[in-house]
Image (cartoon, rainbow, N blue to C red):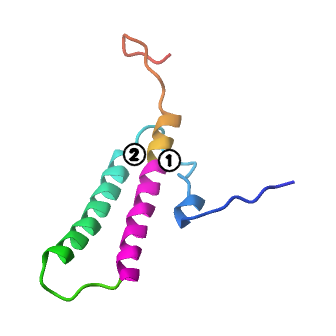
Amino acid sequence: MSTLRSLALPEDLLCVSNDVEAGIPIDAITCAIERADSVLMLLEDHFEGDQSRLSNHIIASVIWDVRGTLGLIKTLTLHGDASSVPLDQKGGAL
């Protein structure tokens, strides 16, 4: 019997491909962080200007997008943690 999980974000369905090499995917993580930072910077600029305000549903969508990117970063870091080989004190694999 299978149980259904409540999925709040599309990223909950995504996983790191099985053919990705082990270790921390630093380029992908850095890219995701920069993407989230850019979206937040655009929102920040919106509140600092004198232009008309965005509607609440657009602001909520921006926040939802950043949450999704944080979920992606979490997925990437969990892959890095699960696939990394612990080293002993001399730097060799355990």
Q: Nearer the viewer, residue 59 or 22?
A: 59
Coordinates of residue 50 in the picture (x, y in percent): 12, 84
Q: Main secondary structure of the magenta part?
A: helix
Coordinates of residue 8 in the picture (x, y in percent): 57, 64
Identify the image quadrant of residue 46.
Answer: bottom left
Answer whether labels 1 and 2 touch (C-beta < 8 Å): yes
**Secondary structure category for the residue under label 2:** loop
Say what amino acid the circle numbered 2 marks.
Pro
The N terminus lies in which quarter of the figure?
A: bottom right
In the rendered view, tell whether residue 90 sits above or below residue 50: above
In the rendered view, tell whether residue 81 sits above or below residue 94: below
Q: Which residue carries the number 2 mark?
A: 25
Coordinates of residue 36 in the picture (x, y in percent): 32, 62
**Which residue range is magenta in the image?**
56-75
Q: Which residue carries the number 1 mark?
A: 20
> Which residue is painted at 79% across and 56% down in the image?
3
Q: Residues within 10 Å of mark 1 (few under 14, many from 20)?
A: few
